């Protein structure tokens, strides 16, 4: 994008030269019109580039960083709201079993009560 800003001077300059040549008394004589137009365009081009690379760069950089941060937060939020997979423990609910894990847990409890007690 920044390389296209050079056209902000390169395109109007020949147009102003042609305009100065075809419209009499635009800014006095043709030579004065060309000199004044060139000076205005060069000053505008230098000012635009200074603002672009000093202020504009940081504005765009921080806007992109904020957008990336918001996307990361959104992705994290989306992962927090996914339904748990069957047989898995939900986040923050470590004591709750679901699906096949409940059946496995109850079958292990039954096996422990059927086993004979070992007396020493």
Image (cartoon, rainbow, N blue to C red):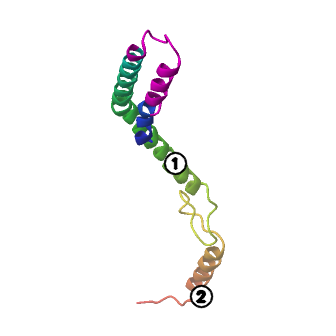
Image position of 115 (left or right of 9) = right
Q: Is residue 96 above or below residue 52?
A: below
Q: Which mark is residue 114?
A: 2
10 Å crowding of disc 2: few (<14), some (14-19), many (20+) = few
Q: Is residue 34 above or below residue 101?
A: above
Distance in Å between CA atoms under marks 2 and 1:
54 Å
Image position of 33 (left or right of 117) = left
Q: Quadrant of residue 13?
A: top left
Q: Secondary structure at mark 1?
A: helix
The image position of residue 78, as x and y in percent, is 58, 54
Residue 50 or residue 86, whichever sits in front: 50
The image position of residue 12, as x and y in percent, is 47, 29
What predominant SS class does the magenta segment belong to? Answer: helix
Residue 113 or residue 34, whichever sits in front: 34
Q: Secondary structure at mark 2?
A: helix
Q: Nearer the viewer, mark 2 or mark 1?
A: 1
Q: Which residue is mark 1?
A: 71
- In the image, is residue 19 part of the stretch drawn in magenta? yes
Mark 2 or 1 closer to N-term? 1
What residue sits 53% from the left and 62% below the top? 94
Image position of 95 (left or right of 10) = right
What residue sits 56% from the left and 55% below the top? 80
Q: Which residues are magenta?
A: 11-32
Q: Which mark is residue 32?
A: none
Residue 31 or residue 84, whichever sits in front: 31
Q: Is residue 5 above or below residue 45?
A: below
10 Å crowding of disc 1: few (<14), some (14-19), many (20+) = few
The image position of residue 79, as x and y in percent, is 56, 57
The image position of residue 41, as x and y in percent, is 40, 23
Quarter placement of the N terminus: top left
């Amino acid at each position: 994008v920044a390389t296209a800003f050079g056209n902000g001077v390169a395109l109007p300059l020949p147009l102003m030269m042609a305009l100065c040549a075809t419209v009499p008394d635009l800014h006095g004589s043709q030579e004065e019109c060309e000199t004044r137009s060139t000076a205005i365009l060069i000053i505008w081009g230098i000012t635009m580039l200074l603002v672009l690379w000093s202020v504009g760069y940081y504005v765009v950089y921080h806007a992109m960083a904020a957008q990336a941060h918001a996307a990361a937060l959104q992705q994290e939020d989306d992962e927090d709201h996914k339904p748990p997979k069957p047989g898995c423990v939900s986040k923050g609910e470590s004591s709750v079993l679901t699906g096949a894990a409940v059946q496995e847990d109850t079958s292990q409890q039954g096996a422990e009560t059927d086993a004979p007690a070992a007396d020493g």
